[in-house]
Image (cartoon, rainbow, N blue to C red):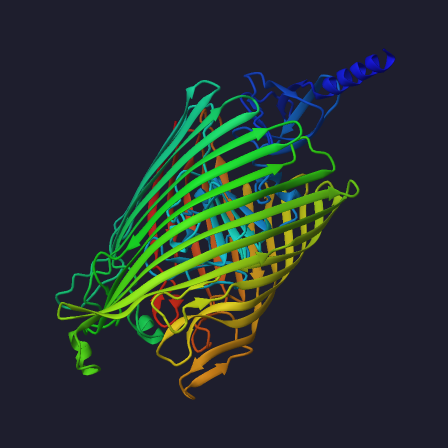
């Protein structure tokens, strides 16, 4: 009987420990005034609420340690730790005016919500306001907004941008930077959301992230998070007009469909731009115009306070006429800027559909996440693409790629009130089917080189693949100040490619090579180790090691070298994150050493037949700096800077002078500036007694890009250059009006150069009008 009663008592005590406690909170300003309608959310949970008009709120939480994120219009966002004991508690939260304090930032870099300054990773987060301030419309606008981040604008089209972090960039379809949109991996580098619309924030993770993100997070990750549905009705409409016929229209709406239960968020954008390039070639159909539209719809269903279901669909459609206005040489591009010589319209079409369903459970002992996604991506040239970059009709081609991928991620993690252990474990599965084809036309004027011209060479291919990965990461607080994080991931990926080639001469098609199939299974083991130490509540130092992996693949249309192997990397970091002067100064510093092995380079063994080959080993080290400061009221200064010293230990490339393969050991990495920096200064002037909290602002940005190589041989360079952007206008709770200029000095620089060359965009200017409802 005594034993039975003891067991009942223990069960009762255990149950009482799990009961939720009531948190009575009040949100106030630094002067003690109440702040009404502040938003309060509990990180890594579905729990959250909104304060009433008097700043009061209630939360029901079980015992444990939590992090609350509190935000309100006109105030700096704050993340406050809360320890819940066994009884009801009263909590007062004090928010600082955003003119006197920097907002604290939450990131999901470790696939859990955490304060940015507490995350021992080199990561930059840009929220919706920052994206607006920097006028970030596309991926190409991200250069230097995060240290060591350089975007190569290689085609004057919506999708043709390469991401380069810490000097690791490839021209194969498998990029060195993995791109995720709302947790969905984008398999092709062209399939990322190149028109940013309805975005909540963008996270740029630097260094290999293979443990949690897997394939192709070789040198970093780009995380794009669209606006999430909430229980509050709001909307916006925005019009952007500029030179070169720029017209950009954006709208978005958020509203509950069922109060406190079902919410929807939707956005739509149309983006059009006229001609930047001219073409003096007689009787050409070339027309330099961009037309793009995109949209997304998200639904959030709160099944209970423990279960949520999120459904998200995103669609993009681009028609870019006059894409890839390349010149054959560096000197030709510089001598005739924004002039193209060609005989075809160079139209590129692109569509991309992403659909995903995320089911999440937030428990007392464990959190669970399931993300199921479908990606349908198609890119093609409906007409011909000029490939000789001259008025002559020598070589042109057309191509298409169609992809379908199905992915499933299952993840379990520690709950919001975790103690000394924080952990994540899971699996990732995918299957893909890819069809592609290309036709190269050797046109009439090519007869001077080959009397058999004109004729066409046709290549067709079908690729299939599947993969599975298992991953885990755990952080343990050895002491209240010292943490150790250990993670590992195992990837297995199988790929198969079937391809053939044909010859078309005067409408007669001849089979050159019948179907041949190549198969390959790739595996990778990517560990991570981090030691971090909190010097104070606002200062963190850490050291880390991480291994990266970029998957191998197939050279479409190349039977001599059908397969290339994976590329691997090792990354060592020392970092320091500091929040100083009562949250008016953020200072982050990172020192990195990045080793690349078996680098995938598009090259040749004979000077004629080109393919992606594993021919390079490269080391790169550098220093990265991020500073945000509010030195006086209403004045904000943001500065990012990075240095990079890259050198090849091995680089086997074909040398035309000796007609043999030569080791270019000692060369520098392509498209990797030795120094880059972005300094932004913005000053606001509030209008006294404005009911809509209106204020005027003026903003200036100076971006400096140091010298970078335009080819692997290091024969051509883009010298260092500086660029000024300016923006000024009026902002309020309801309306914003801004006038902006990009590249104020009309600086001419080479944006792309590797066998063909293209200038960066000239001076762009315009105005933006936004209505917020």
Choose between 26 and 408: the one closer to the eye: 408
Q: Report the residue that reaches farthest toward the right.
A: 2
Q: Is residue 525 left or right of residue 186?
A: right
Q: Residue at x 55, y 43 (%)?
A: 635
Q: Nearer the viewer, residue 130 or 489?
A: 489
Left or right: where 620 falls relative to 132: right
Please identify the quarter of the rendering in which residue 140 is found: bottom left
Residue 459 spot, x, y in % from top left: 28, 65
Where residue 316 appears, x then y in whole percent?
A: 33, 44
Instruction: From the top left corner, tell me how far across and down residue 22 is, in percent.
Output: 67, 17
Q: Is residue 741 above or below residue 601?
A: above
Confirm whether residue 746 shows in the render: no
Position of residue 481 in the picture relative to residue 558 (left or right):
right
The residue nearer to you, when weighing 560 against 376, is 560
> With 530 as the anchor, is 269 left or right in this view?
left
Instruction: Look at the picture and state if 59 lies above or below 169.
Output: above
Q: Which residue corresponds to the image point at 43% horizontal and 48% vertical from the top-left?
A: 431
Q: Say which quarter of the image contains residue 464.
A: bottom left
- The answer, for residue 714, to whether it is visible in the render is yes
Give residue 335's position: percent from left, percent from top: 30, 73
Which quadrant would the C terminus be assigned to in this image? top left
Q: Quadrant of the N terminus?
A: top right
- Indicate whether 41 appears above or below 523: above
């Amino acid at each position: 009987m005594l034993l039975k009663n003891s067991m009942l008592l223990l069960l009762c005590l255990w149950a009482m420990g799990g009961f939720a406690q009531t948190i009575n909170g009040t949100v106030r300003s630094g002067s003690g005034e109440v702040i009404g309608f502040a938003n309060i959310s509990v990180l890594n949970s579905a729990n959250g609420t909104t304060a009433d008009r008097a700043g009061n709120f209630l939360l029901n939480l079980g015992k444990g340690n939590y992090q609350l994120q509190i935000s309100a219009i006109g105030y700096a966002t704050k993340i406050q730790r809360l320890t819940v004991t066994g009884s009801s508690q009263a909590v007062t939260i004090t928010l600082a005016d955003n003119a006197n304090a920097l907002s604290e930032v939450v990131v999901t870099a470790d696939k859990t919500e955490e304060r940015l300054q507490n995350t021992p990773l080199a990561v930059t987060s840009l929220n919706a306001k920052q994206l607006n301030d920097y006028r970030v419309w596309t991926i190409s606008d991200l250069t230097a907004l995060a240290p060591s981040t350089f975007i190569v604008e290689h085609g004057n089209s919506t999708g043709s941008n390469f991401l380069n972090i810490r000097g690791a960039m490839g021209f194969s379809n498998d990029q060195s930077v993995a791109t995720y949109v709302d947790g969905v991996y984008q398999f092709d580098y062209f399939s990322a959301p190149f028109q940013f619309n309805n975005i909540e924030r963008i996270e740029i993770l630097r260094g290999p992230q293979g443990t949690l993100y897997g394939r192709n997070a070789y040198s970093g990750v780009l995380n794009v998070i669209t606006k999430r549905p909430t229980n509050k009705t709001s909307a916006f409409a925005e019009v952007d007009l500029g030179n070169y016929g720029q017209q950009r229209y954006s709208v978005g709406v958020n509203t509950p469909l069922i109060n406190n239960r079902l919410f929807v968020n939707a956005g739509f954008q149309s983006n059009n731009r006229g001609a930047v390039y001219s073409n003096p070639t007689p009787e050409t159909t070339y027309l330099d115009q961009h037309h793009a539209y995109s949209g997304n719809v998200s639904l959030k269903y709160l099944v209970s306070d423990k279960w949520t279901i999120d459904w998200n669909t995103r669609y993009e459609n681009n028609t870019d006429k006059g894409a890839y206005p390349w010149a054959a040489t560096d000197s030709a591009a510089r001598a005739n800027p924004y002039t193209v010589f060609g005989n075809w319209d160079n139209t590129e079409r692109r569509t991309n559909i992403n659909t995903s369903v995320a089911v999440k459970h937030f428990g007392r002992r464990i959190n669970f996440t399931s993300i199921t996604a479908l990606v349908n991506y198609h890119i093609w040239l409906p007409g011909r693409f000029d490939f000789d970059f001259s008025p002559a009709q020598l070589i042109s081609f057309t191509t298409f790629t169609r992809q379908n991928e199905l992915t499933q991620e299952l993840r379990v993690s520690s709950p919001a009130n975790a103690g000394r252990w924080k952990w994540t474990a899971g699996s990732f599965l995918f299957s893909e089917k890819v069809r592609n084809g290309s036709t190269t036309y050797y046109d009439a004027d090519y007869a001077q080189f080959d009397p058999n011209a004109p004729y066409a060479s046709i290549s067709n291919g079908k690729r299939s693949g599947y993969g599975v990965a298992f991953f885990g990461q755990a952080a343990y607080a050895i002491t209240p100040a010292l943490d150790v994080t250990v993670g590992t991931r195992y990837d297995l990926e199988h790929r198969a490619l079937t391809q053939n080639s044909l010859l078309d001469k005067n409408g007669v098609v001849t089979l050159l090579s019948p179907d041949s199939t190549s198969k390959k299974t790739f595996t990778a083991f990517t560990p991570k180790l981090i030691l971090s130490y909190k010097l104070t509540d606002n200062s963190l130092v850490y050291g880390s090691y991480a291994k990266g992996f970029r998957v191998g693949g197939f050279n479409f249309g190349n039977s001599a070298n059908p397969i290339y192997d994976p590329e691997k990397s090792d990354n060592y970091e020392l970092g320091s994150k500091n929040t100083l002067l009562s949250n008016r100064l953020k200072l982050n510093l990172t020192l990195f050493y990045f080793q690349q092995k078996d680098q995938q380079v598009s090259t040749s063994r004979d000077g004629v037949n080109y393919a992606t080959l594993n021919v390079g080993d490269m080391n790169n080290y550098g220093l990265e700096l991020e500073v945000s400061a509010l030195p006086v009221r209403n004045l904000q200064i943001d500065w990012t800077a990075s240095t990079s010293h890259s050198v090849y230990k091995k680089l086997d490339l074909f040398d035309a002078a000796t007609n043999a393969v030569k080791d270019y050991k000692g060369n520098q990495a392509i498209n990797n500036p030795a120094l880059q920096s972005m300094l932004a200064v913005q000053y606001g002037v509030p209008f006294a007694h404005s009911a809509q909290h209106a204020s005027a602002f003026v903003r200036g940005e100076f971006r400096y890009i140091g010298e970078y190589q335009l080819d692997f041989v290091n024969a051509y360079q883009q010298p260092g250059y500086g660029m000024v952007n300016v923006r000024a206008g009026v902002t309020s709770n309801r309306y914003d009006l801004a006038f902006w200029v990009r590249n104020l000095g009309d600086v001419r620089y080479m944006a792309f150069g590797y066998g063909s060359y293209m200038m960066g965009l000239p001076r762009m200017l315009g105005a933006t009008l936004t209505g917020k409802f």
